Image: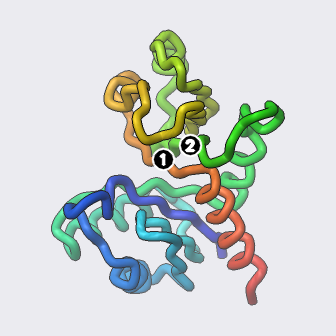
């Protein structure tokens, strides 16, 4: 049985699109996803599943969120091994002076392809540094994330796929939860 990390986009930001984590766990249990565990209030759920088609599974979760909570939220899924790979591919890992609290990984719903990737590299993002690898975008915010110069809507229009960001601490914590769940009987 695979362990999967689920990340919802745009929930619990401000007073709109609210989902309590106990309600989200109950929704995953209703969908027959086993041992769902949430992490922080931003819609992260780690669970076990026998489902192999993750695109179909994401769509089932999105449909049930819409039915249960009255709005549609994009659901991005990664397996435990994919999350390990995300961490291993961190382009900033060997560079001195990188503060983990200023590093964001954006998980994309799909690979936007080489043409979109090329267009992304032409966008001026300074002082933020943007590196794309597969279905992930690594963004370093040297001045912090509070007032970035980077225009996410421009990047999203360029890539033509949705995504959701998690700070480096959350990325590594989600992997730890997934590995713990994998090791459990």
Q: Residue at x 56, y 71 (%)?
A: 46
Q: Residue furthest top?
A: 122
Quarter of the rendering occupied by the C terminus: bottom right
Estimate how packed mark 1 is, as few (under 14), some (14 to 19) or many (20 or more) residues with alpha carbons within 10 Å.
Answer: many
Q: Is residue 31 left or right of residue 16?
A: right
According to the image, label 2 marks what residue? 104
Residue at the bottom extreme?
185
> Relative to 163, is 107 on the left or the right?
right
Q: Observer-nearest residue: 23 or 47?
A: 23
Residue 73 sits in which quadrant?
bottom left
In-front residue for pair 152/59: 152
Q: Residue 90: x percent and y percent?
A: 72, 39
Q: Are marks 2 and 1 in contact (CB under 8 Å)?
A: yes
Residue extending furthest toward the front: 143
Q: Position of residue 45 (x, y in %)?
A: 50, 70
Q: Nearer the viewer, residue 155 or 93?
A: 93
Say which residue appears at 52% left-offset and 38% top-offset: 144
Residue identifier under label 1: 165
- The residue tagged with tag 1: helix, strand or loop? strand
Say if residue 32 shows up in the picture: yes
Dot 2 or dot 1, earlier in sequence:
2
Q: Quadrant of the N terminus?
A: bottom right
Q: Quadrant of residue 182?
A: bottom right
Q: CA distance from mark 2 to mark 1?
A: 6 Å
Q: Position of residue 50 (x, y in %)?
A: 58, 74
């Amino acid at each position: 049985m695979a362990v999967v990390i689920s990340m919802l986009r745009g929930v619990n930001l401000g007073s709109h699109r609210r989902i309590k984590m106990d309600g989200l766990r109950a929704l995953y249990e209703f969908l027959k996803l086993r041992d769902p565990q949430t992490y922080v209030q931003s819609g992260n759920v780690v669970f076990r599943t026998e489902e192999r088609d993750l695109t179909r599974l994401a769509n089932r979760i999105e449909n049930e969120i819409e039915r249960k909570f009255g709005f549609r939220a994009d659901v991005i899924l990664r397996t435990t091994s994919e999350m390990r790979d995300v961490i291993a591919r961190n382009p900033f890992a060997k560079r001195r002076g990188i503060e983990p609290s200023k590093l964001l990984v954006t998980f994309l719903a799909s690979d936007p392809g080489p043409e979109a990737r090329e267009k992304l590299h032409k966008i001026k993002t300074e002082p933020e540094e943007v590196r794309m690898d597969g279905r992930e975008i690594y963004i370093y915010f040297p001045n912090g994330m509070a007032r970035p110069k980077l225009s996410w809507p421009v990047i999203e229009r360029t890539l033509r796929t949705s995504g959701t960001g998690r700070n480096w601490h959350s990325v590594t914590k989600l992997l730890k939860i997934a590995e713990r769940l994998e090791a459990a009987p």
